[in-house]
Amino acid sequence: MKPVDLRSDTFTKPTPAMRRAMAEAEVGDDVYGEDPTMNRLQELAAEIFGREAALFVPSGCMGNVLAIKTWTKPTNEVICEERSHVNLYELGSMSAIAGCIPRTTPAPNGILTWELVEPLIREKIYYDSQTALVTLENSHNMHGGTVYTQAAAENVCNGAHAAGLRVHLDGARIFNAAVALGAKVADLTRGCDSVMFCLSKGLGAPVGSMLAGSKDFIEEVRVGRKLLGGGMRQAGVLAAAGLVALEETPKILHVDHENARRLAEGIAQIKGLKIDPKKVVTNIVIFDVKGSGWTANDFCARLEKMGILALSVEKYEVRFVTHYDVDRAGIERALVAVEELMTARSSASAN
């Protein structure tokens, strides 16, 4: 039987509609700005986010570091939540490529507030690294897909702008946040100076992310993309799938959220595992397995033998991510496997 893959929504496969669009895409040389399909994707992304322009980039990591590099200069500090993706999972690119230093702080549920950000801003002293940028993450991966409301994001953005700082949003899963809140992505991201979002996670495209912002910002980012080797030629074959993803998949993301809630509610009933189902509002489910007596790596290895793929994110934390390639039957299979695993563990301990 085919495994139930809940490691990440990056494991989505392009839909038949995406594959047809890729095969039929009209293409040109995107380095020259002459790929019509890519141009349509970029125009649509800018329109949806209420921005002057947008640019396709090969990955979310590249999009984030390009934004950071554009808004800062070497030796600057970037304020971010300590478990944010830009801090933990991008190979220190803000330091290696942009020459910046992350200045981190923990935040309840991963949601920064101006009250947390303001004390981290450096004084204007010439021998101090100067604060230049604040980054937000919506939804927040390592806090289980928690979301910034529009008011929460604008609380940080308004304070940052008054202090002369820019704000970049890592919106890899911003459409999940928007669906969870019943809001428009343009409204949720309005206060940010730039936005990155992924086409290749829950939206299901095979490759790519987008950066959106002002025309001047995007022109500078375009130069940075070329510098990093991200200039592509007949990229319309990728943009075609991105167009389908952007136009069609947000309509069905609520199903992934329903499946995530089902997982969370089921796991909460299993002795030895800990999760608060009320905190699961998007498609990410992170639960504590310490009560099992196994580490997260051990737990995932045993689940894999049962045909369920999960990810270890901390020593005792396991992550499931729902997406359109796992239906409700797959969710139920995962819950049965987890319960059987814990029942067997309990029986073994009793003996």
Image (tube, helix red, strand yellow):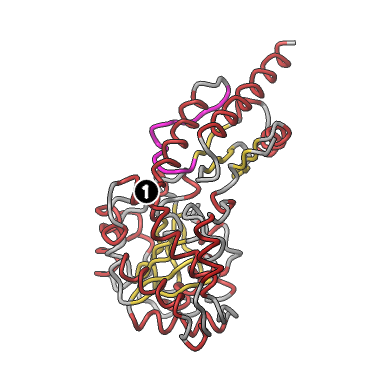
| Residue at point 53%, 63% (across, down) | 20
Quarter in which the N terminus is drawn:
top right
Q: Quadrant of residue 273?
A: top right
Residue type marked 1:
Val
Quarter in which the C terminus is drawn:
top right
**SS of the residue under disc 1:** loop
Q: Quadrant of residue 171?
A: bottom left
Task: State whether residue 94 appears in this view.
Answer: no
Q: Position of residue 232 (x, y in %)?
A: 56, 80
Horizontally, residue 90 falls left or right of residue 173, namely: right
Q: Position of residue 132 (x, y in %)?
A: 39, 73
Q: Identify the residue under disc 1.
A: 147
| Residue at point 66%, 39% (across, down) | 3
Residue range in magenta is 272-284
Counting other residues with Cα less than 10 Å from the Cα at mark 1, is it few (<14), some (14-19), or many (20 or more)?
A: many
Q: Position of residue 68 (x, y in %)?
A: 46, 72
Q: Position of residue 69 (x, y in %)?
A: 48, 76
**Residue 147 drawn above or below residue 127:** above
| Residue at point 46%, 85% (across, down) | 33
Horizontally, residue 147 falls left or right of residue 86, namely: left
Task: State whether residue 144 appears in this view.
Answer: yes
In this orientation, which residue lies closer to the viewer: 262 or 159? 262
